[in-house]
Amino acid sequence: MLFRSGLPILRSLRILEDQTKPGVLKNALQDIVEDVEAGSTLSEAMEKHPKAFDNLYVHTVRAGEAGGVLDQILRKLAEFMEKSMALKRRIVGAMVYPVMVITVAVIILIAIMFFIVPKFKEIFEKFDIPEDLPVPTQILIDVSETVGRFWYVLPSIPFGIWVIFRFMKASKG
């Protein structure tokens, strides 16, 4: 919008830099301002910061510079980014409910394994029910005893899953 309103690109970049919160984007904008002042094109300066600007963004800006329609390209990119961020917010919002349901289900399952299944085991033992319990029942009792014995491992499971996902994400990119 700043560039389209007639401000020079360098002035527009400085205004953006001043309004941006500290982080990757602010650092990238500072470097881009320096590079543009030194004579680089906007796309060349942006290309040096792949964490802030992906290839699609850089190449689109380069095409806008070459075609003389940079203001239109920047407006389209801004619209695309706004729509993309709105979609991400909706996806995150949609994921809150399933995550909460799964969390509650896991808490209930753990409570059953810690408190209810051991009571059933005591009842079975009190009434001298033969050791030949059905296989699923025996498995449930064995799992409950294992969970009770190694309860301190349970909090590390979500952390381990998080570490695995971070490792997988890092190895892809």
Image (tube, rainbow, N blue to C red):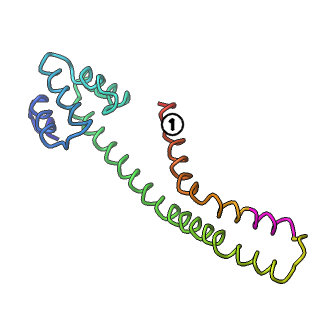
Image quadrant where residue 140 sits: bottom right
Majority secondary structure of magenta residues: helix
Q: In this orientation, which residue lies closer to the viewer: 113 or 59?
A: 113
Q: In this orientation, which residue lies closer to the viewer: 30 or 10?
A: 30
Left or right: residue 5 versus residue 147 is left
Image quadrant where residue 52 sits: top left
In the image, is residue 138 part of the stretch drawn in magenta?
A: yes
Give the residue type at disc 1.
Phe
Q: In this orientation, which residue lies closer to the viewer: 59 or 161?
A: 161
Relative height, residue 108 to residue 28 (above, below): below
- Residue 39 spot, x, y in % from top left: 15, 16
- Per the rendered image, the range of residues in magenta is 134-142
Q: Residue at x 17, y 30 (%)?
A: 30
In the image, is residue 10 part of the stretch drawn in magenta?
A: no
Tag 1 residue = 167
- Residue 41 spot, x, y in % from top left: 21, 20
Q: Residue at x 54, y 41 (%)?
A: 164
Left or right: residue 138 versus residue 55 is right
